[in-house]
Image (spheres, rainbow, N blue to C red):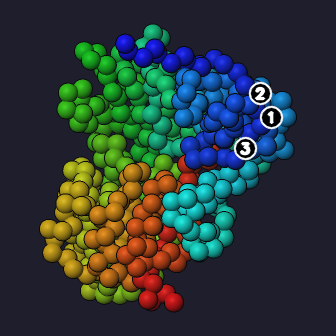
Amino acid sequence: MPAEPKKSLVGEEYEVEIGPVAHGGHCIARTSEGQVLFVRHTLPGERVVARVTEGEEGARFLRADAVRILEPSKDRIEAPCPYAGPGRCGGCDWQHAKPGAQRRLKGEVVAEQLKRLAGLTPEEAGWDGTVMPAEGDKLPAGQVPQWRTRVQYAVDPATGKAGLRHHRSHEVEPIEHCMIAAQGVSELGIERRDWTGMETVEAIAATGSQDRQVILTPRPGARLPLVELDKPVSVLRVDEKSGGVHRVHGRPFVRERADGRTHRVGGGGFWQVHPKAADTLVTAVMQGLLPRKGETALDLYCGVGLFAGALADRLGDKGAVLGIESGKRAVEDARHNLADFPRVRIEQGKVESVLPRTGITEADLIVLDPPRSGAGRDTVSHLSSLGARRIAYVACDPAALARDLAYFREHGYRVRTLRVFDLFPMTHHVECVAIMEPVEKGR
């Protein structure tokens, strides 16, 4: 006979003591029976009533929200955003924590991932344990930096109103204003109009130019609305069959400014969402690599060429840079952005497929900025064989970074320095820059 379905525990409440922070924007607690809870909307050391949001009897862990705070942490504040809290918008994880406490929590997560997945202490990674805020983001508790230059709104199918999704849900929280949205996004007035027939509306406010862009994803069979917003804007749409992005009117790209150069980014392609992020990361990478005139460099997962351009500028006329990027539109943009560097070459394809075909057997410097899943063991093995004197690894996920650092260590590279930046305030996300060098050259 088939096994009886396990009883759902959704809605059950437990009074618990909150333990340490965990990767993903929650903290760990245990019920009196020893069941593990991943609890959102709480802080370490608090005593709360946690209501289960996902899980069943016998599950390895349950997910829960702190719905009543019995003993608050000294780091707790009233969430500035009216849409933050249990069962509300899932975009921010730490609205209820003081800014300094948010950075400490993120630092604890990075340290835990390094220890668990790479066997490294902060000292062994050349990191002092601090998480640095971006310029202009060090605000008093209760104030929220307006940093997000790209916001994807979900559209409520019943009302046509734009909002943001609940945590781990397709349910939409209609909003009048997103507090972390950059001023250029807020000025578009996305929340104030009817988007009936649309699945999502993405708003982009470029850094260093006045370019504004809206990307519409229609529901099957829906017609595009006449877009009349509060500011001049170009409009693109996502094709429901191919997933491609097509111009409706205006430019098919935005112009982003970083490292003294203008970069074309087309079709909603990747660019750092914090207005200070691109410059912050280029500075950290270049300070770590210390490029020398005439060297050769690789820029892997190169996007529209941010790091490739920075490298080419510093390596001079006799230096050379190879960039590899899988996205066709990003490659077109990178080639456009770097056309004034004759010794820069951009290849399209996956790094693990393209790099072996290039015939490159050595490089002086390597920059890699892989997707959230990381580079992986095979790619790390190949990179380690090229004998680079320094490697810069830019990571948006500390777990993937730690796994790959362990692989690099297996192949004779050690972490020289690690810098951690809070480029996503109010959320659990961080950006890390690890600089590595061969062990024999570093000791």
Please say if the residues under marks 1 and 3 sit with CB atoms less than 8 Å apart: no
- At horizontal 47% and vertical 11% (from top left) the residue drawn is 159
Q: Position of residue 211 (x, y in %)?
A: 41, 45
Q: Position of residue 49 (x, y in %)?
A: 75, 26
Residue count near mark 1 (Cα–Cα under 10 Å), binned few <14, some 14–19, many ≥20: many
For label 2, the residue is: 15
Q: Residue furthest top?
A: 158
For label 3, the residue is: 19
Residue 223 visible to the viewer? no
Which structural element holds mark 3? strand
Q: Residue furthest front?
A: 1
Please say if the residues under marks 1 and 2 sit with CB atoms less than 8 Å apart: yes
Q: Amino acid at mark 1?
A: Arg
Which structural element holds mark 2? strand
The answer to whether 27 is drawn above or below residue 362 in the figure is above
Q: Amino acid at mark 2?
A: Glu
Residue count near mark 3 (Cα–Cα under 10 Å), binned few <14, some 14–19, many ≥20: some
For label 1, the residue is: 47
Residue count near mark 2 (Cα–Cα under 10 Å), binned few <14, some 14–19, many ≥20: some
Residue 366, picture quadrant: bottom left
Residue 46, picture quadrant: top right
Q: Amino acid at mark 3?
A: Gly
- At horizontal 21% and vertical 80% (from top left) the residue drawn is 361
- How far apart are labels 2 and 3 at the CA level? 13 Å
The answer to whether 380 is drawn above or below residue 2 in the figure is below
